[in-house]
Image: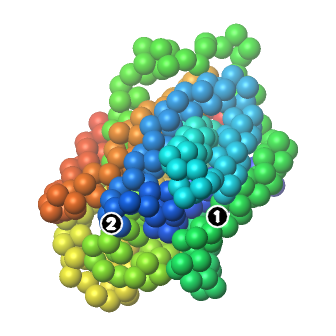
């Protein structure tokens, strides 16, 4: 597809690191159903999940800080340097989670440790998204940029699939009691070791031509400069990210809990259902990336913004009555297919909107803010509405936020035809 060996190796290297980062992030969501009683022993299952959801949300709250810090760092010191710093932080957060003491041993310091570890992961991922999205978009050749840039979200899905796969393997070899007692630590040990390996890999990646072509006296990459010079783009990226992020986490990480806590599937069955749906979702990324190269970015984003909004309520209402795991997986694949219009192309669209000197920050910060406000709080909102006996209001909420992304898409330019990534 018109790509050199050097570019191909760089894209694969950047993608592999992205996969590991997102594996570490999603391992928390995948294993929360097991470690929730260990850190929050009081209350029913919904209350325990609410507590872990609150810590999950804190990880999102600090992501804008990570996006600001490492977005500026990537714009100043290089995309490769930003990628290396983000994965080093993820290593520390995952290692701390693996070694975290339980409530039975240290009382309140157990959830505090959980909180600190999640904040480290949030800072890491806040920078990872912008750095990897910018790196892959700048490395991809112009004529196939949508296809190659889709690897950013493809490996994000791959990270979640790896977390699910580890869960499936552990569920097959360990009892639920063993997983709750100590088995939940294993995925975080794996994540820390993988992050260390990726740190070494990323130190040897090639730098992008866009960064190397920037003048030494280029304008500073700051939040003020982003707001003053690119306000409209930043707001639209935030709106797009809010809908895309909320939808992605609704149908992947939260859906596992929904299938267990509302629909009534066992924890293991819920994991298998999400795993099957994610395999399909992962396969859709390069397909929608290639379609964006041919037909444009906006049509793909509109498939998500309009189609995803209309599908949300019917899918949830049907899932409520579903008893077949196969039917549940097929139902979840519907919104995930529509979601692919966003997920395969969102990082590229954002990178194409901003000039090189502020691209890392422009991609990362509005995205992180949109995700913190909507994706990061979705589990708390969903579980709170369930606790209050009005869970169906959550379905409406999902539809409305996705529609907001549709509005943002309508207001965006077609970046395929006016990309600010000048180098080919």
Residue 331 percent coordinates (x, y):
31, 77
Q: How is the image coloured?
A: rainbow
Q: Which of the 4 quarters of the picture holds residue 183?
A: bottom right
Q: Position of residue 216 (x, y in %)?
A: 74, 14
Determine the residue positioned at 42% across, 35% down: 369
Viewport quadrant of the N terminus: bottom right
Image x and y of residue 249, in percent: 41, 57
Question: Could you tell me if residue 288 is visible in this image?
Answer: no
Identify the residue under disc 2: 44
Q: Residue at x 45, y 47 (%)?
A: 55
Front disc: 1 or 2 = 2
Q: Is residue 240 above or below residue 339?
A: above
Which of marks 2 and 1 precedes in the sequence?
2
Instruction: Residue 146: give x, y in percent of width and height.
Output: 54, 52
In this rendering, does residue 103 appear at all? Answer: yes
Specify the quadrant of the image occupied by residue 253: bottom left
Asked if residue 58 is positioned above or below residue 100 in the image, the reply reads: above
Residue occupying the point 71% across, 61% down: 189
The single residue placed furthest to the top in the displayed view is 217
Q: Camera-side residue: 119 or 254?
A: 119
């Amino acid at each position: 597809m018109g790509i050199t060996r050097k570019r191909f190796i760089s894209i694969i290297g950047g993608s592999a690191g992205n996969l590991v980062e997102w594996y570490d992030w999603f391992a928390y969501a995948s294993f929360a159903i097991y470690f929730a009683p260990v850190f929050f022993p009081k209350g029913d299952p919904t209350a325990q999940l609410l507590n872990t959801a609150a810590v999950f949300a804190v990880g999102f709250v600090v992501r804008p800080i990570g996006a600001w810090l490492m977005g500026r760092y990537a714009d100043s010191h290089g995309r490769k340097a930003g990628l290396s710093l983000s994965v080093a932080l993820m290593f520390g957060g995952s290692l701390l989670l693996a070694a975290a003491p339980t409530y039975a041993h240290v009382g309140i310091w157990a959830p505090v440790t959980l909180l600190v570890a999640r904040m480290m992961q949030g800072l890491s991922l806040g920078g990872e998204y912008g750095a990897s999205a910018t790196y892959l978009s700048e490395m991809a050749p112009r004529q196939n940029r949508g296809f190659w840039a889709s690897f950013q979200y493809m490996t994000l899905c791959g990270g979640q699939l790896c977390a699910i796969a580890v869960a499936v393997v552990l569920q097959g070899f360990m009892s639920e009691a063993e997983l709750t007692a100590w088995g939940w630590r294993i995925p975080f040990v794996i994540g820390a070791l993988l992050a260390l390996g990726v740190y070494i890999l990323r130190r040897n990646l090639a730098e992008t031509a866009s960064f190397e072509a920037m003048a030494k006296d280029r304008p500073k990459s700051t939040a003020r400069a982003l707001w003053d010079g690119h306000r409209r783009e930043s707001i639209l990226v935030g709106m797009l990210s809010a809908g895309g992020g909320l939808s992605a986490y609704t149908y992947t990480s939260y859906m596992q809990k929904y299938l267990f806590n509302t629909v009534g599937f066992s924890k293991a069955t819920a994991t298998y259902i999400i795993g099957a749906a994610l395999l399909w979702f992962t396969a859709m990324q390069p397909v929608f990336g290639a379609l964006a190269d041919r037909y444009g970015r906006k049509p793909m984003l509109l498939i998500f913004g309009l189609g995803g909004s209309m599908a949300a309520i019917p899918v949830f209402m049907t899932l409520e009555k579903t008893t077949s795991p196969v039917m549940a997986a097929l139902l979840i694949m519907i919104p995930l297919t529509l979601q692919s219009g966003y997920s395969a192309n969102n990082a590229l669209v954002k990178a194409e909107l901003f000039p090189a000197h502020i691209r890392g920050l422009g991609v990362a910060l509005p995205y992180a803010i949109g995700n913190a406000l909507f994706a990061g709080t979705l589990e708390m909102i969903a579980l709170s509405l369930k606790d209050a006996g009005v869970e169906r209001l959550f379905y409406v909420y999902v539809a409305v936020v996705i529609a907001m992304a549709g509005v943002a898409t309508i207001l965006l330019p077609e970046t395929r035809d006016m990309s600010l990534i000048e180098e080919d």
